[in-house]
Image: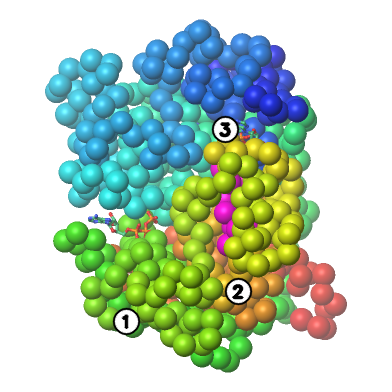
Amino acid sequence: MIRFSQVSVTYADAAAPALGPVDLTVPEGELCLVVGPSGVGKSTLLGTVSGLVPHFTGGTLRGRVTVDGRDTREHRPRNLADVVGTVGQDPLAHFVTDTVEDELAYGMESLGLPPATMRRRVEETLDLLGLAALRDRPIATLSGGQQQRVAIGSVLTPHPRVLVLDEPTSALDPAAAEEVLAVLTRLVHDLGTTVLMAEHRLERVVQYADRVLLLPGPGAAPVLGDPATVMARSPVHPPVVALGRLAGWNPLPLTVRDARRRAAPLRRRLAARRPIPVAGPGPGAPLLTARRLAVRRERTEVLRGVDLTVRPGETVALMGRNGAGKSTLLRTFVGMHAPAGGEVAVAGPDGAALVPHRARPGALLRGVGLVPQDPRDLLFAETVAAECAAADGDAGASPGTCRALVTRLLPEVPDEAHPRDLSEGQRLVLALAVILTAAPPVLLLDEPTRGLDYAAKARLIGVLRELAAAGHGVVLATHDVELAAELAHRTVVLAEGEVVADGPTAEVLVASPSFAPQVTKVLAPDPWLTVPQVRAALDDVPDAA
Ligand SMILES: Nc1ncnc2c1ncn2[C@@H]1O[C@H](COP(=O)(O)OP(=O)(O)OP(=O)(O)O)[C@@H](O)[C@H]1O
Ligand SMILES: Nc1ncnc2c1ncn2[C@@H]1O[C@H](COP(=O)(O)OP(=O)(O)OP(=O)(O)O)[C@@H](O)[C@H]1O
């Protein structure tokens, strides 16, 4: 269905191709998962199928990509729309209408489908993606995950034969991600739709893939194969595969269910042991406080009666369904929303409490920094190098500090690139480095793992642990249960603007089937959360455990 013949892509001014050569065929009616490290060229590969590369991105496409026989270089994306539906990494940039319902109908209107069909499919899709209550809402007022659902819905309604999806679950809560994958699987099985999907959170998707296309590294030849075979050698793999490799299981499990069947010997080896406890926060006055906080957006009360404190050395994960109010809460701590009720305070540089929406920006910035859900909101310079130099200057850090952080998190982010032209993971790393360079006492990170491969995530965890050990407070709004499991001392769950759980991460995650990490599901009821915990216990001398 999709044929790549000697395809390579070189962006303008780049020393080496961003992709290729790629020479392979994706058969009709399969779900093909594209995996590989951050910045390796996954989005570029997807773009050659949807026609975005090179028509919208520039650069040179060599070779030929055909979709259902049509050459994507000769057809602009608009002229492929009857065959290919695309969801990019940045849905907001691609919305064409203002409201949810109009956006769901737009693709069908441009194909001239009969009104009755359009009506029926809009209603189906609203239900399928949990959007019915939002149908009349302006898209600009939706949360990140709600927007991602609309973007997915809008490509499903025209029933294209090929779907090209770039990290489609990155902003979705775990339950929504499962629902979207169930819908996609149904399209593949029942209608013979072909799905080409890039994703980093393999724990969410690998079990649904018919085939995996691995881009192993810059310049390395792509590998296309069945999921188990590719996962056995892939540098990126989900926790359940990492656990299988650690325990020496053969064949490797791809699902929690398969892993549980093989887990008995590992359980015995771990029997007398317990996870090595991580040092929790020390004493100290809270760095950040919310009391009975209420925040309104237009007529809706988006946060209600929220109580939260964060102490020096503490890392808190903020979780909860799409639209629960996580981003709103983080933005309130940096003064972007004024409370409609209750109190909010941040410890200022001299220890005095600052009220964020009334504080002088300069003073507030020295107390608290936010990496927003869209890292673009933080990046203003023309090049990576200039952005890093500005961050060093603003923070009074020695020259090179920010750049060194970028490189520590992700090697090979090009100095001269415009932040707009970076891959998703590269751009996020740059925004993280800007805020980490300032290193204010409180760090707020809104979904800080989009676009990041597992190795980059592990390095970010290392940096954040160091900051917590040095007395910083960290709050992460995230749907990444594996990140929360590794990093957070405490997890707070929001539902419809209210705190519904607040406790040690191990307890909160294990209590909920949709939040439990893979290792927990495999080894339950034993108290393990992550692969590094299991590895440390196995490495440990027996009587030390
Ligand atoms: N429009 C562009 N102009 C110049 N360079 C680009 C452009 N888009 C991407 N690149 C570069 O091409 C390389 C591949 O980027 P791409 O977005 O395809 O990676 P990716 O594997 O999807 O990454 P991620 O996992 O972070 O989303 C990166 O080094 C990136 O900086
Ligand atoms: N102008 C507005 N009018 C009405 N509701 C709004 C407005 N702006 C935001 N909202 C709603 O506020 C709620 C909270 O949004 P927020 O972005 O804080 O959620 P979130 O928990 O971060 O979600 P996600 O996980 O999807 O990023 C959402 O239901 C959103 O639709």
Disc 1 vs disc 2: which is toward the camera?
1
Which circle marks residue 527 in the picture?
2
Indicate the quadrant of ligand 1 in the picture.
top right
Which circle marks residue 343 in the picture?
1
Residue 392 picture location, percent across and down: 66, 60
Label 3 within 8 A of ligand 1 by Cβ: yes
- Describe the element under mark 3 as helix, strand or loop: helix
Which amino acid lies under the numbered mark 3 shown in the image of this protein?
Ser
Among the two numbered marks 3 and 1 on one chain, the one whose residue lies closer to the N terminus: 3
Residues drawn in magenta: 424-436
Which amino acid lies under the numbered mark 2 shown in the image of this protein?
Pro
**Which residue occupies 50% across, 8% down?**
74
- In the figure, is residue 163 to the left or right of 3? left
**Which residue occupies 71% across, 54% down?**
403
CB under 8 Å between discs 1 and 2: no
Residue in the foreground of this view, choosing between 466 and 541 = 466
Marks 1 and 2, how far apart at CA: 37 Å
**Which residue occupies 74% across, 36% down?**
217
Residue in the foreground of this view, choosing between 240 and 372 = 372
Among the two numbered marks 2 and 3 on one chain, the one whose residue lies closer to the N terminus: 3
